[in-house]
Image (tube, grey):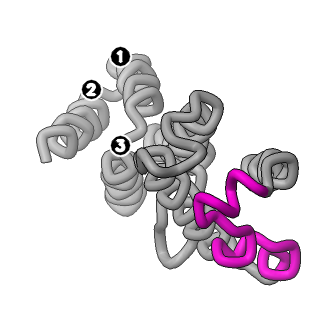
């Protein structure tokens, strides 16, 4: 939302250039009324649509905004922000936050598995490790690998199962 508002400020200060380049807030569905009604997924898609439209304009030699350095940087910033999100179960989620929640849940379940020795808990941990691989959050996967090392002395069998799960999924 912040990037959309930033774009709208720039747009308002350069309306003639954007209009000549066929960029319009209404056409991009970025007007206040539309944005207020958007779900997270619709907002994500509108932001993506804005980035694509701006990219096509800066690549057009006939455009007043051809190779505009500020817009190129802005598009890169938008893409960087959008890359932090993925669609999952018809919702847009922040991969870092989701990975952190999974990681915390895995750590809690590991402590339960150390005391209870339950296959269901081990299976749940493996499924969550698989989800971490699906979103490919490398920082969290590295942290998890380090955390698994700490249980090696406590329960070598649990460690072996979980490290195998971690390594199998990384090959997939």
Q: Is residue 124 left or right of residue 115?
A: left
Q: Is residue 14 left or right of residue 104?
A: right
Asked whether 96 or 29 is in front, the reply is 29
- Structural distance between the alpha carbons of marks 3 and 2: 26 Å
Residue at image coords 38%, 54%: 131
Q: Quadrant of residue 138?
A: top left
- Structural distance between the alpha carbons of marks 1 and 3: 28 Å
Q: Position of residue 101 (x, y in %)?
A: 60, 47
Q: Is residue 156 left or right of residue 93?
A: left
Mark 1, Cα crowd under 10 Å, few <14 / some 14-19 / many 20+, is few
* Disc 3 secondary structure class: loop
For marks 3 and 2 on the same chain, the one whose residue lies earlier in the sequence: 3
- Structural distance between the alpha carbons of marks 2 and 1: 6 Å
Q: Which residue is mark 1?
A: 153
Q: Is residue 156 left or right of residue 4?
A: left
Magenta-highlighted residues: 16-36
Q: Which residue is mark 2?
A: 156
Q: Which residue is mark 3?
A: 136
| Pair 1/3: label in front | 3
Q: Is residue 12 above or below residue 41?
A: above
> Tags 2 and 1 in contact by the CB under 8 Å rule?
yes
Q: Is residue 168 above or below residue 5?
A: above
- How many numbered dots are placed on residues in this image? 3
* Disc 1 secondary structure class: loop
């Amino acid at each position: 939302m912040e990037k959309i508002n930033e774009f709208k400020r720039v747009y308002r200060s350069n309306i003639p250039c954007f209009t000549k380049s066929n960029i319009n807030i209404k056409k991009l569905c970025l007007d206040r009324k539309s944005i207020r009604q958007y779900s997270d997924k619709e907002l994500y898609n509108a932001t993506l649509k804005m980035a694509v439209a701006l990219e096509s304009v800066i690549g057009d030699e006939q455009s007043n905004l051809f190779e505009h350095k500020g817009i190129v940087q802005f598009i890169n910033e938008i893409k960087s922000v959008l890359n932090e999100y993925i669609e999952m179960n018809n919702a847009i989620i922040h991969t870092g936050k989701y990975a952190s929640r999974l990681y915390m849940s895995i750590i809690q379940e590991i402590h339960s598995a150390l005391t209870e020795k339950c296959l269901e808990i081990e299976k749940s941990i493996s499924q969550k490790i698989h989800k971490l691989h699906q979103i490919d959050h490398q920082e969290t996967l590295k942290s998890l690998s380090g955390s698994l090392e700490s249980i090696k002395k406590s329960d070598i069998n649990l460690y072996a199962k979980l490290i195998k799960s971690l390594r199998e999924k990384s090959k997939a």
